[in-house]
């Protein structure tokens, strides 16, 4: 027996987008429920609880800023927040906003379809269905996991974990032989951490990474006070920074090519010592724009790897050779130093690829690597995977993923809206900014969408739908900016190249935060990108 509940709005996913959307809807008098597959809030930070998981955005800016009271009521302990602390922060937020009564945990939404005859979304959970006027999937871009297709993996008798499905109970790594597949942010963080406990860590690397050094000191009382005292200017500063992280100013407001090689090298050395993560990318004003300038930094970073790693062959295998920033740069504490430990070894999959999984481990063309645990830090089917899993059907039963042709024909209006899918707003995911701090984007877009609803509601409109023209125009903009950026020049999840057979397409907005705010304003200010009509249907 399926029960059908009726609501104004359904939100899916209790991450930064979903929580804020639910809050605004509730405050605006909508009946709303947030459905979350996990047993707690946190989104990304609920699922990615692998050893060493930490955020690369300074904690001061990895927070909601829509409420001064909310902001000031939370104290971060260190400069960069660890996964468990972000999770605690998000629990704090929902408790403070008293949102738990509108959240249903352990509830995975299986599918949703728009029923035109009643102008409602019908949203299906396991045992029940909900009818809602508005549907807000806030399911994230990086939520559908990807694991490499290695023949015979099922024969492995040891334990297997994906970093994004890490068990809640403690995994005993002590004295184990661990294989880590993948050297993105999750791989790098877990390699460093597991090496402290494991008997041996074998790293299976497909592409070498630029890993920028970082430190993570505890915040002092003075710093905490300063952060709170500066709240009044916080939103402004965040929104005036190209990545929404004002801790990283452009240090030299001229080209990297304008300094002599000696001066540049001295400056890069100083930044390496300071170890402040993404700050490196803002050393000069053209590192992310000009390939030659970019090369000065990548050359320096390769030099550092050679200096740090004792074994020349390992060092050689760790050398990345592409534009930094074209792929998501990784930041970590003492990553390259980890390869000087006796219990860490590197396998370069480009030289010795996998052949198969075996009972005892993984066989490459070189040898069988015997393992007790395999950690898949192998990333996600970004953007497209979550939409495929969400089974969203618009008008005439069209599946959104089919409309997008699995990514080959990806189209959105401002990332959130699609023609043929009235009253549905995707929060986060495809066509949202790629390299910008998430909480400020979530705040910006959720508020924009909420204002859009209010605008049309006040006009008595209850069917809002993106026009095909608006969709074309936003998609063209995404593609044009993407083509100009480094994101189209380097294989990565930014463009679908991380997964064999996935269509290559620019999956997100590649411009900076300042451009994004301008473009979003232009696209949404007059609401010309929507058709609006009014259909009253008695339920
Ligand atoms: P990423 O950044 O997508 O990293 C995944 C890693 O797994 C990366 O090194 C991949 O190599 C590697 N990978 C993927 N498929 C394979 C196969 N088939 N064989 C071997 N290695 C493979 O995911 P993360 O979870 O680390 O980080 C996701 C985001 O979280 C990150 O961008 C930050 O925003 C935080 P590749 O480089 O593609 O050759």
Image (spheres, helix red, strand yellow):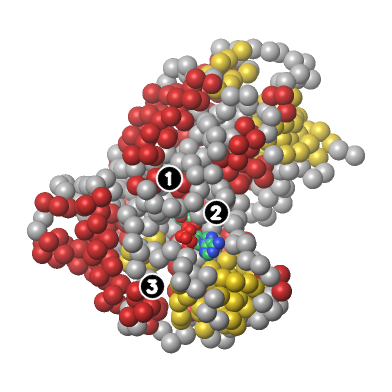
Q: Which dot marks residue 434?
A: 1
Residue 357 at what x, y percent from top left? 64, 73
Q: Is mark 2 within 8 Å of ligand 1?
A: yes
Alpha-carbon distance for marks 2 and 1? 18 Å
Q: Which quadrant is home to the C terminus? A: top right
Question: In this rendering, is residue 123 above or below 318?
Answer: above
Q: Earlier in the sequence, mark 2 or mark 1?
A: 1
Tell me the crowding category of disc 3: few under 14, some 14 to 19, or many 20 or more residues within 10 angstroms, Cα based.
some
Badge 3 or badge 2: first in the primary sequence = 3
- Which residue, given by chain and number where applicable, does mark 3 sit on? 317
Side of 227 relative to 67 (left or right): left
Q: Quadrant of residue 271?
A: bottom left
The residue sitting at 63% across, 17% down in the picture is: 462
- Give the residue at x 69% y 24%: 395
> Mark number for residue 57?
none
Q: Secondary structure at mark 3?
A: helix
**Camera-side mark, 3 or 1:** 3
Residue at image mark 2: 499
């Amino acid at each position: 027996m399926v029960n059908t509940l009726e609501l104004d709005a359904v939100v899916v996913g209790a991450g930064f987008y979903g929580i804020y959307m639910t809050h605004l809807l509730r405050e605006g008098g909508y009946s709303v429920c947030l459905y979350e597959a996990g047993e707690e809030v946190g989104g990304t930070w609920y699922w990615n609880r692998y050893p060493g998981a930490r955020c690369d955005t300074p904690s001061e800016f990895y927070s909601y800023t829509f409420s001064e009271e909310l902001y000031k009521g939370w104290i971060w302990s260190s400069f960069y927040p660890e996964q468990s602390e972000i999770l605690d922060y998000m629990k704090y937020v929902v408790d403070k906003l008293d949102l738990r009564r509108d959240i249903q945990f352990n509830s995975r939404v299986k599918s949703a379809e728009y029923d035109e005859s009643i102008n409602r979304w019908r949203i299906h959970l396991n045992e029940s269905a909900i009818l809602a006027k508005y549907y807000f999937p806030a399911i994230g871009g990086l939520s559908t996991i990807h694991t490499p297709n290695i023949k015979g993996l099922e024969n492995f008798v040891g334990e297997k974990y994906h970093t994004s499905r890490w068990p809640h109970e403690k995994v005993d790594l002590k004295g184990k032989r661990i294989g880590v597949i993948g050297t993105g942010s999750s791989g790098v963080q877990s390699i460093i951490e597991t090496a402290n406990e494991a008997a041996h860590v074998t790293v299976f690397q497909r592409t070498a990474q630029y890993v920028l050094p970082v430190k993570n000191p505890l915040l002092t009382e003075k710093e905490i006070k300063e952060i709170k005292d500066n709240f009044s200017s916080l939103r402004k500063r965040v929104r005036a920074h190209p990545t929404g992280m004002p801790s990283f100013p452009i240090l030299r407001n001229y080209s990297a090519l304008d300094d002599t090689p000696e001066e540049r090298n001295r400056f890069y050395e100083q930044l390496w010592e300071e170890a402040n993560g993404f700050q490196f990318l803002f050393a000069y004003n053209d590192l992310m724009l000009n390939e030659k300038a970019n090369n000065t930094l990548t050359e320096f970073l390769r030099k550092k790897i050679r200096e740090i790693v004792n074994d020349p062959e390992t060092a050689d295998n760790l050398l990345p050779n592409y534009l930094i920033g074209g792929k998501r740069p990784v930041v970590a504490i003492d990553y390259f130093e980890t390869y000087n430990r006796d219990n860490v070894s590197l396998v370069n999959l480009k030289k010795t690829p996998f052949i198969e999984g075996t009972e005892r481990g993984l066989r490459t063309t070189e040898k069988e690597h015997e393992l007790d645990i395999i950690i898949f830090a192998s990333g996600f089917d970004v953007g497209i995977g979550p939409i495929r899993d969400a089974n969203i059907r618009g008008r005439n039963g069209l599946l959104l993923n089919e409309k997008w042709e699995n990514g080959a024909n990806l189209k959105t209006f401002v990332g959130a809206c699609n023609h043929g899918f009235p009253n549905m707003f995707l929060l986060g995911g495809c066509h949202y900014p790629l390299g910008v701090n998430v909480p400020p984007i979530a705040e910006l877009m959720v508020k924009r969408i909420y204002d859009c609803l209010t605008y049309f509601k006040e006009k008595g409109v209850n069917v809002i739908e993106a026009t095909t023209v608006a969709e074309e125009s936003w998609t063209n903009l995404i593609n044009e900016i993407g083509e100009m950026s480094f994101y189209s020049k380097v294989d990565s999840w930014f463009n679908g190249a991380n997964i064999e057979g996935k269509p290559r397409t620019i999956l997100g907005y590649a411009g900076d935060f300042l451009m994004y705010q301008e473009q979003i304003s232009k696209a949404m200010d007059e609401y010309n990108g929507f058709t609006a009509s009014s259909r009253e249907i008695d339920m």
